[in-house]
Protein backbone atom coordinates (compact mmCIF):
# COMPACT_ATOMS: atom_id res chain seq x y z
CA UNK A 1 0.00 0.00 0.00
CA UNK A 2 1.42 3.41 -0.92
CA UNK A 3 1.67 5.75 2.04
CA UNK A 4 0.64 9.38 1.72
CA UNK A 5 1.91 12.36 3.71
CA UNK A 6 -1.67 13.63 3.92
CA UNK A 7 -4.28 12.56 6.45
CA UNK A 8 -6.83 12.30 3.62
CA UNK A 9 -7.92 8.73 3.04
CA UNK A 10 -9.12 7.21 -0.20
CA UNK A 11 -12.51 5.46 0.08
CA UNK A 12 -10.99 2.18 -1.04
CA UNK A 13 -8.31 2.07 1.68
CA UNK A 14 -8.85 -0.68 4.25
CA UNK A 15 -5.64 -0.72 6.30
CA UNK A 16 -5.47 0.58 9.85
CA UNK A 17 -2.61 1.80 12.00
CA UNK A 18 -3.22 0.81 15.61
CA UNK A 19 -1.95 1.55 19.08
CA UNK A 20 -2.45 -1.19 21.69
CA UNK A 21 -1.91 0.48 25.03
CA UNK A 22 -2.01 0.05 28.78
CA UNK A 23 -1.77 3.25 30.81
CA UNK A 24 -0.34 3.64 34.30
CA UNK A 25 -3.24 3.75 36.74
CA UNK A 26 -1.46 6.01 39.22
CA UNK A 27 -1.09 8.87 36.76
CA UNK A 28 -4.54 10.19 35.79
CA UNK A 29 -2.98 13.21 34.10
CA UNK A 30 -1.22 10.92 31.61
CA UNK A 31 -4.45 9.04 30.90
CA UNK A 32 -6.29 12.30 30.28
CA UNK A 33 -3.54 13.66 28.04
CA UNK A 34 -3.37 10.49 25.94
CA UNK A 35 -7.14 10.24 25.65
CA UNK A 36 -7.40 13.87 24.49
CA UNK A 37 -4.61 13.34 21.98
CA UNK A 38 -6.32 10.28 20.51
CA UNK A 39 -9.61 12.13 20.33
CA UNK A 40 -7.99 15.10 18.57
CA UNK A 41 -6.46 12.70 16.03
CA UNK A 42 -9.88 11.18 15.32
CA UNK A 43 -8.83 7.73 16.53
CA UNK A 44 -11.48 5.04 16.96
CA UNK A 45 -11.60 2.38 19.66
CA UNK A 46 -11.59 -1.05 18.00
CA UNK A 47 -11.23 -3.15 21.16
CA UNK A 48 -10.38 -2.37 24.80
CA UNK A 49 -7.03 -0.64 24.69
CA UNK A 50 -6.70 -0.78 20.89
CA UNK A 51 -7.09 2.58 19.16
CA UNK A 52 -6.91 2.81 15.36
CA UNK A 53 -6.54 5.33 12.57
CA UNK A 54 -6.48 4.86 8.80
CA UNK A 55 -2.97 3.82 7.78
CA UNK A 56 -0.70 6.57 6.51
CA UNK A 57 2.63 8.19 7.33
CA UNK A 58 1.16 11.14 9.26
CA UNK A 59 -1.11 9.00 11.44
CA UNK A 60 1.59 6.41 12.05
CA UNK A 61 4.11 9.06 13.12
CA UNK A 62 1.62 10.54 15.58
CA UNK A 63 0.83 7.13 17.05
CA UNK A 64 4.57 6.45 17.37
CA UNK A 65 4.92 9.68 19.33
CA UNK A 66 2.09 8.71 21.66
CA UNK A 67 3.62 5.25 22.15
CA UNK A 68 6.91 6.85 23.24
CA UNK A 69 5.09 9.15 25.66
CA UNK A 70 3.13 6.26 27.19
CA UNK A 71 6.29 4.18 27.62
CA UNK A 72 8.10 7.11 29.28
CA UNK A 73 5.22 7.44 31.76
CA UNK A 74 5.49 3.78 32.79
CA UNK A 75 2.75 2.35 30.57
CA UNK A 76 3.01 0.00 27.63
CA UNK A 77 2.20 0.64 24.00
CA UNK A 78 2.56 -1.52 20.92
CA UNK A 79 2.13 -0.25 17.39
CA UNK A 80 0.18 -2.66 15.17
CA UNK A 81 -1.06 -2.79 11.58
CA UNK A 82 -4.40 -4.27 10.54
CA UNK A 83 -5.56 -5.16 7.05
CA UNK A 84 -9.18 -5.96 6.25
CA UNK A 85 -9.77 -9.59 5.23
CA UNK A 86 -12.64 -8.79 2.86
CA UNK A 87 -14.91 -6.01 1.62
CA UNK A 88 -17.35 -6.46 4.50
CA UNK A 89 -14.64 -6.00 7.10
CA UNK A 90 -13.24 -3.04 5.17
CA UNK A 91 -16.67 -1.43 5.36
CA UNK A 92 -16.80 -2.08 9.11
CA UNK A 93 -13.37 -0.46 9.46
CA UNK A 94 -14.57 2.65 7.63
CA UNK A 95 -17.72 2.88 9.76
CA UNK A 96 -15.54 3.13 12.87
CA UNK A 97 -14.74 6.69 11.75
CA UNK A 98 -18.29 7.79 10.82
CA UNK A 99 -18.92 11.39 11.87
CA UNK A 100 -22.60 11.55 10.87
CA UNK A 101 -23.89 12.08 14.42
CA UNK A 102 -21.40 14.89 15.06
CA UNK A 103 -22.27 16.55 11.77
CA UNK A 104 -25.93 16.19 12.76
CA UNK A 105 -25.33 18.17 15.96
CA UNK A 106 -23.51 20.81 13.96
CA UNK A 107 -26.36 21.04 11.44
CA UNK A 108 -28.76 21.62 14.34
CA UNK A 109 -26.58 24.47 15.58
CA UNK A 110 -26.55 26.03 12.09
CA UNK A 111 -30.37 25.81 11.93
CA UNK A 112 -30.60 27.41 15.38
CA UNK A 113 -28.42 30.32 14.26
CA UNK A 114 -30.58 30.86 11.20
CA UNK A 115 -33.71 30.93 13.37
CA UNK A 116 -32.25 33.26 16.00
CA UNK A 117 -30.33 35.56 13.64
CA UNK A 118 -33.05 38.25 13.24
CA UNK A 119 -32.95 38.93 16.98
CA UNK A 120 -29.16 38.96 17.33
CA UNK A 121 -26.77 41.88 17.02
CA UNK A 122 -24.56 41.65 13.93
CA UNK A 123 -21.28 41.07 15.86
CA UNK A 124 -22.83 38.19 17.80
CA UNK A 125 -24.25 36.64 14.62
CA UNK A 126 -20.85 36.83 12.95
CA UNK A 127 -19.05 35.43 15.99
CA UNK A 128 -21.40 32.45 16.17
CA UNK A 129 -21.05 31.83 12.45
CA UNK A 130 -17.25 31.87 12.67
CA UNK A 131 -17.38 29.45 15.60
CA UNK A 132 -19.57 27.04 13.60
CA UNK A 133 -17.26 27.33 10.60
CA UNK A 134 -14.27 26.49 12.82
CA UNK A 135 -16.08 23.52 14.31
CA UNK A 136 -16.94 22.26 10.84
CA UNK A 137 -13.33 22.61 9.71
CA UNK A 138 -12.08 20.76 12.79
CA UNK A 139 -14.57 17.96 12.27
CA UNK A 140 -13.78 17.76 8.56
CA UNK A 141 -10.09 17.31 9.42
CA UNK A 142 -10.87 13.98 11.12
CA UNK A 143 -13.63 12.95 8.70
CA UNK A 144 -11.44 10.43 6.89
CA UNK A 145 -14.18 9.01 4.66
CA UNK A 146 -16.32 12.05 3.71
CA UNK A 147 -19.95 11.46 2.86
CA UNK A 148 -23.23 13.30 2.41
CA UNK A 149 -23.44 14.41 6.05
CA UNK A 150 -20.33 16.56 5.75
CA UNK A 151 -21.44 18.03 2.41
CA UNK A 152 -24.88 18.77 3.86
CA UNK A 153 -23.43 20.78 6.76
CA UNK A 154 -21.02 22.65 4.50
CA UNK A 155 -23.91 23.65 2.22
CA UNK A 156 -25.97 24.76 5.23
CA UNK A 157 -23.09 26.87 6.55
CA UNK A 158 -22.52 28.50 3.16
CA UNK A 159 -26.22 29.25 2.85
CA UNK A 160 -26.32 30.66 6.40
CA UNK A 161 -23.36 32.91 5.64
CA UNK A 162 -25.08 34.22 2.49
CA UNK A 163 -28.26 34.95 4.41
CA UNK A 164 -26.48 36.77 7.20
CA UNK A 165 -24.70 38.85 4.57
CA UNK A 166 -28.02 39.57 2.87
CA UNK A 167 -27.02 38.03 -0.45
CA UNK A 168 -29.85 36.93 -2.77
CA UNK A 169 -30.63 34.98 -4.84
CA UNK A 170 -29.05 31.83 -3.51
CA UNK A 171 -26.37 30.43 -5.77
CA UNK A 172 -26.00 26.74 -4.98
CA UNK A 173 -23.06 24.89 -6.58
CA UNK A 174 -23.52 26.43 -10.00
CA UNK A 175 -27.33 26.39 -9.91
CA UNK A 176 -29.66 29.14 -8.80
CA UNK A 177 -32.81 28.79 -6.71
CA UNK A 178 -35.05 31.71 -7.68
CA UNK A 179 -37.44 33.20 -5.12
CA UNK A 180 -41.06 32.81 -6.29
CA UNK A 181 -44.34 34.31 -5.13
CA UNK A 182 -46.86 31.81 -3.83
CA UNK A 183 -49.72 33.92 -5.11
CA UNK A 184 -48.73 33.04 -8.68
CA UNK A 185 -48.82 29.30 -7.95
CA UNK A 186 -52.38 28.74 -6.81
CA UNK A 187 -54.84 26.12 -8.13
CA UNK A 188 -52.13 24.56 -10.24
CA UNK A 189 -51.45 21.03 -11.43
CA UNK A 190 -48.30 19.58 -9.85
CA UNK A 191 -46.82 16.55 -11.60
CA UNK A 192 -44.29 14.00 -10.40
CA UNK A 193 -43.36 10.35 -10.85
CA UNK A 194 -45.94 7.79 -9.83
CA UNK A 195 -45.61 5.54 -6.75
CA UNK A 196 -44.14 8.38 -4.72
CA UNK A 197 -41.66 7.86 -1.92
CA UNK A 198 -40.49 10.22 0.82
CA UNK A 199 -39.27 13.24 -1.18
CA UNK A 200 -42.27 13.27 -3.53
CA UNK A 201 -44.75 12.71 -0.69
CA UNK A 202 -43.16 15.33 1.54
CA UNK A 203 -43.02 17.77 -1.37
CA UNK A 204 -46.71 17.17 -2.08
CA UNK A 205 -47.46 17.82 1.60
CA UNK A 206 -45.43 21.05 1.48
CA UNK A 207 -47.26 22.16 -1.66
CA UNK A 208 -50.70 21.37 -0.23
CA UNK A 209 -50.10 22.83 3.23
CA UNK A 210 -47.80 25.79 2.57
CA UNK A 211 -47.73 26.77 -1.11
CA UNK A 212 -50.90 26.08 -3.12
CA UNK A 213 -54.24 26.27 -1.30
CA UNK A 214 -56.00 24.10 -3.91
CA UNK A 215 -53.46 21.94 -5.75
CA UNK A 216 -54.09 19.03 -8.09
CA UNK A 217 -51.56 16.24 -8.34
CA UNK A 218 -50.69 14.22 -11.41
CA UNK A 219 -48.71 10.98 -11.06
CA UNK A 220 -46.61 10.26 -14.13
CA UNK A 221 -45.65 6.81 -15.33
CA UNK A 222 -43.30 8.57 -17.78
CA UNK A 223 -41.96 12.01 -16.72
CA UNK A 224 -41.38 12.82 -20.40
CA UNK A 225 -45.18 12.89 -20.74
CA UNK A 226 -45.55 15.74 -18.23
CA UNK A 227 -48.14 18.22 -19.62
CA UNK A 228 -46.78 21.61 -20.60
CA UNK A 229 -49.08 23.45 -18.19
CA UNK A 230 -48.17 21.28 -15.19
CA UNK A 231 -45.52 22.14 -12.61
CA UNK A 232 -43.11 19.22 -12.50
CA UNK A 233 -41.16 18.24 -9.41
CA UNK A 234 -38.65 15.58 -8.43
CA UNK A 235 -37.62 14.27 -11.82
CA UNK A 236 -34.86 15.20 -14.26
CA UNK A 237 -35.78 18.39 -16.09
CA UNK A 238 -38.57 19.30 -13.67
CA UNK A 239 -39.02 22.89 -12.56
CA UNK A 240 -38.47 21.83 -8.94
CA UNK A 241 -35.94 19.08 -8.40
CA UNK A 242 -32.61 18.39 -6.68
CA UNK A 243 -30.31 21.44 -6.70
CA UNK A 244 -26.77 21.55 -5.36
CA UNK A 245 -27.20 18.44 -3.23
CA UNK A 246 -30.57 19.47 -1.82
CA UNK A 247 -33.62 17.29 -2.40
CA UNK A 248 -36.77 18.51 -4.15
CA UNK A 249 -38.49 19.33 -0.84
CA UNK A 250 -35.57 21.62 0.04
CA UNK A 251 -35.68 23.26 -3.39
CA UNK A 252 -39.38 24.03 -2.88
CA UNK A 253 -38.62 25.45 0.58
CA UNK A 254 -36.02 27.84 -0.83
CA UNK A 255 -38.05 28.72 -3.93
CA UNK A 256 -41.06 29.91 -1.95
CA UNK A 257 -39.25 31.53 0.97
CA UNK A 258 -40.31 28.90 3.47
CA UNK A 259 -36.83 28.13 4.75
CA UNK A 260 -37.12 30.62 7.61
CA UNK A 261 -39.45 28.13 9.32
CA UNK A 262 -37.13 26.00 11.47
CA UNK A 263 -39.68 23.20 11.82
CA UNK A 264 -39.95 22.95 8.02
CA UNK A 265 -36.16 22.93 7.82
CA UNK A 266 -35.94 20.09 10.33
CA UNK A 267 -38.49 18.14 8.35
CA UNK A 268 -36.32 18.77 5.29
CA UNK A 269 -33.32 17.27 7.08
CA UNK A 270 -35.41 14.17 7.76
CA UNK A 271 -36.51 13.91 4.12
CA UNK A 272 -32.92 14.46 2.97
CA UNK A 273 -31.62 11.70 5.25
CA UNK A 274 -34.10 9.16 3.85
CA UNK A 275 -33.82 10.23 0.23
CA UNK A 276 -30.08 10.72 -0.30
CA UNK A 277 -28.41 10.06 3.06
CA UNK A 278 -26.70 12.62 5.23
CA UNK A 279 -26.85 13.49 8.89
CA UNK A 280 -28.82 10.96 10.95
CA UNK A 281 -32.29 11.95 12.15
CA UNK A 282 -33.93 10.16 15.07
CA UNK A 283 -37.33 10.02 13.40
CA UNK A 284 -36.02 8.62 10.09
CA UNK A 285 -36.48 4.89 10.79
CA UNK A 286 -40.03 5.40 12.05
CA UNK A 287 -41.06 7.51 9.06
CA UNK A 288 -39.49 5.03 6.63
CA UNK A 289 -41.42 2.16 8.24
CA UNK A 290 -44.72 4.06 8.11
CA UNK A 291 -44.28 5.07 4.48
CA UNK A 292 -43.18 1.59 3.45
CA UNK A 293 -46.29 0.13 5.07
CA UNK A 294 -48.53 2.73 3.44
CA UNK A 295 -47.01 2.11 0.00
CA UNK A 296 -47.49 -1.63 0.39
CA UNK A 297 -51.11 -1.28 1.51
CA UNK A 298 -52.34 1.47 -0.84
CA UNK A 299 -52.09 1.05 -4.60
CA UNK A 300 -53.70 4.36 -5.63
CA UNK A 301 -51.31 7.32 -5.46
CA UNK A 302 -54.01 9.89 -4.61
CA UNK A 303 -55.16 7.68 -1.74
CA UNK A 304 -51.55 7.19 -0.66
CA UNK A 305 -51.00 10.94 -0.49
CA UNK A 306 -54.27 11.44 1.44
CA UNK A 307 -53.21 8.78 3.94
CA UNK A 308 -49.72 10.20 4.49
CA UNK A 309 -50.57 13.91 4.70
CA UNK A 310 -51.46 13.58 8.43
CA UNK A 311 -48.13 11.85 9.08
CA UNK A 312 -46.26 14.93 7.84
CA UNK A 313 -48.71 17.18 9.73
CA UNK A 314 -47.80 15.39 12.96
CA UNK A 315 -44.07 15.49 12.25
CA UNK A 316 -44.27 19.22 11.54
CA UNK A 317 -46.15 19.78 14.80
CA UNK A 318 -43.56 17.65 16.61
CA UNK A 319 -40.72 19.79 15.27
CA UNK A 320 -42.59 22.99 16.14
CA UNK A 321 -43.09 21.79 19.72
CA UNK A 322 -39.41 20.80 19.94
CA UNK A 323 -38.36 24.32 18.94
CA UNK A 324 -40.68 25.91 21.50
CA UNK A 325 -39.36 23.84 24.43
Image (cartoon, rainbow, N blue to C red):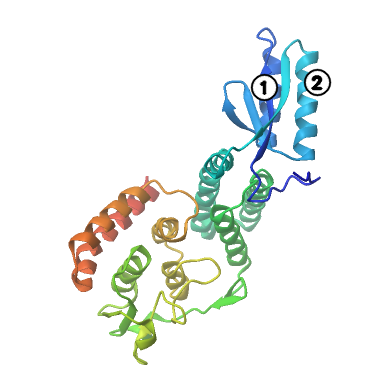
Q: Residues within 10 Å of mark 2 (few under 14, many from 20)?
A: some
Q: Name the residue that disc number 1 marks.
A: 20
Pick the residue in front: 29 or 225: 225
Q: Quadrant of residue 191?
A: bottom left
Residue in the picture at 80% in, 14% down: 72
Residue holding disc 2: 68
Rendered image quadrant of residue 275: bottom left
Q: Is label 1 in a helix, a strand or a loop?
A: strand
Q: Secondary structure at mark 2?
A: helix
Q: Is residue 266 left or right of residue 160?
A: left
The one of 80 and 125 positioned closer to us in this rendering = 80
Quarter of the rendering occupied by the N terminus: top right
Tag on residue 33?
Answer: none
Q: CA distance from mark 1 to mark 2?
A: 12 Å
Instruction: Locate residue 294, reporting x and y percent.
Output: 22, 59
The 10 Å Cα crowd at callout 1, few under 14, some 14 to 19, many 20 or more, is some
Looking at the picture, how far across and down is residue 157, in whole percent? Answer: 60, 58
Q: State whether residue 120 appears in this view.
A: no
Residue 285 in percent (x, y) is at 35, 48
Amino acid sequence: MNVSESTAVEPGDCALAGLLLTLPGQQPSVRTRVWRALRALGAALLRDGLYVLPAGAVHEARLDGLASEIAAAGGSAERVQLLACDAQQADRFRRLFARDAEFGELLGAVSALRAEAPGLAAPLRERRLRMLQRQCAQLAAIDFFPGEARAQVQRALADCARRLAGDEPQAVEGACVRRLERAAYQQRCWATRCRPWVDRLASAWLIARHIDAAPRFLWLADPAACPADALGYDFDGAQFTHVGGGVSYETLLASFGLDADVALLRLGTLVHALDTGGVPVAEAAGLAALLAGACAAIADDDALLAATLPVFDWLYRHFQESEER
